[in-house]
Amino acid sequence: MNDPKIGIVGAGPGGLVAARILSLAGKDVTVFERESSFSERSQGGSLDIHADAGQIALRKAGLMDEFRKIARYADQENRIYDKHGKLMHVDTNVANKDRPETDRGHLRGMLLKSLPHKVVRWGTPVAGVMPLPKSGCALNFADGASERFDLVVGADGTWSKVRPLLSDAIPKYTGITLIEFGIDNVDERFPDTAEMAGRGLTFALGDSKVLGAHRLANAHLGGYVGLRVAEDWFQANGLDERDDMGARELLCAEFAGWSDDLLRWIRRSEGKLTPRGIYELPSGHRWEYHESVTLLGDAAHVMSPWGGDGANLAMLDGAELAEALLQPDWRTAVARFEEIMCARAEGPARDASEAIQEVFSPRGLEHSLQLWAHTLGQAGQE
């Protein structure tokens, strides 16, 4: 009873942080990941790792020294343009900031490297979870196999296979889709675009739309088009089957009247265009405690990316859940963990939901400028 067998579904940052802390303590933990390998897909863009969340988790996991090797402290600048390419806000002072950027792939790779080889089982999609008559749960896999655990942790993101056992909440489409693109070696190939985008996160806003750019490692510029569109807009326009200039021109057509300097970000990109519909669970999402199942990260509190809290909260969730599982009365400790986690996520989820609707509104530029002015004012008072 005091040394539970733990199954974690999902090898994202939250699940891997939990597995790292548990494995260091010699606990019986296995992570199940549906992807066949780390290299199966692109790992996505950049994350800012917050001092009061993600960095706390990495410190608990004994990984801060490794993190500093991949953290980009210089890439914390911010810029905002209007749709005509006029610079409306710039903040290049990174001296006292402590939200360093790191590529998602680098972060995930660091966490995976920190685990014993057999902790993560790749290519093992989970079909669902079934409570057992006396205690524990069976994890049912897509191939028909199953395995018993004292505790199953749903760390499997927005469309969690574990969540339905605890909650009937379904993530809601916000009405907004981000379409990602990228430019390799931007400094050498397109120095004008590199200078415009800067070292950090850059937005251009207008007409209830957003064109964004984010500096990544190795002179890669990650970009995205943000639109209020139907949930199936990307597929309905055939963009899921195209990787050519015509597809990029279709995106540019959504930005009629915008600066050519901004639209070059799209036209100069290469590689696959990747849509990411933005979904969210209700702020304050909770469930009745179950002694053999819990959730963390997006499985528990998926929210819009505005604010950058999702991955940071997931890592902190993972660290605190692992600490709870190291307690003699781990079931009581997990129940307490859930209370703290859900309360902590409620405010950021509400704020992120409100923020994304404001940004993708006719006053999106005004809202963003006011937000940055408020943020800088707070920083000046510290």
Image (spheres, rainbow, N blue to C red):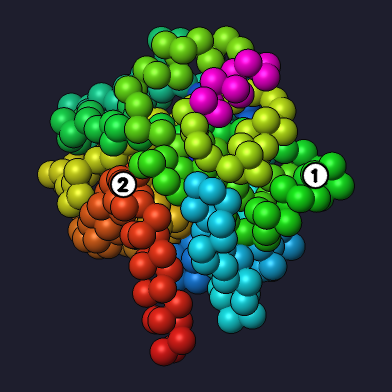
Q: Which residues are magenta?
A: 243-253
Report whether residue 355 is seen: yes
Residue 179 position in % (x across, y down): 51, 31
Read off the residue under disc 2. 362
Q: Residue furthest left?
A: 288
First of labels 1, 2 by sequence position: 1
Residue picked out by circle 1: 190
- Please state the horizontal and vertical placement of residue 294, each as a whole percent of the image: 28, 43
Q: Is residue 137 above or below residue 343?
A: above
Give the spatial CA distance, label 1 vs label 2. Answer: 31 Å
Report if residue 20 is visible in the image. Answer: no
Question: Residue 234 appears in which quarter of the rendering?
Answer: top left
Residue drawn where x is 67% and y is 59% of the image: 198
Residue at image point 37% right, 66% down = 371
Label 1 sits on what residue type?
A: Phe
Q: Is residue 107 magenta?
A: no
Q: Quadrant of residue 367?
A: bottom left
Task: Tell me which amino acid carries mark 2.
Answer: Pro
In-front residue for pair 367/221: 367
In x, y percent, where is residue 68?
69, 66
Instruction: Assess disc 2: are there few (<14), some (14-19) or many (≥20) residues with their C-alpha within 10 Å of its C-alpha.
Output: some
> Which of label 1 and label 2 is nearer to you?
2
SS under mark 2:
loop
Q: Identify the secondary structure beneath mark 1.
A: loop
For mark 1, does the 10 Å Cα neighbourhood hold few (<14), some (14 to 19), or many (20 or more) residues? Answer: some
Instruction: List the single residue furthest toward the right.
Output: 188
Mark number for residue 166?
Answer: none
Residue at 62% across, 59% down? 200
- Horizontally, residue 126 falls left or right of residue 82, namely left
User: In the picture provided, is 371 more to the left or to the right than 96?
Assistant: left
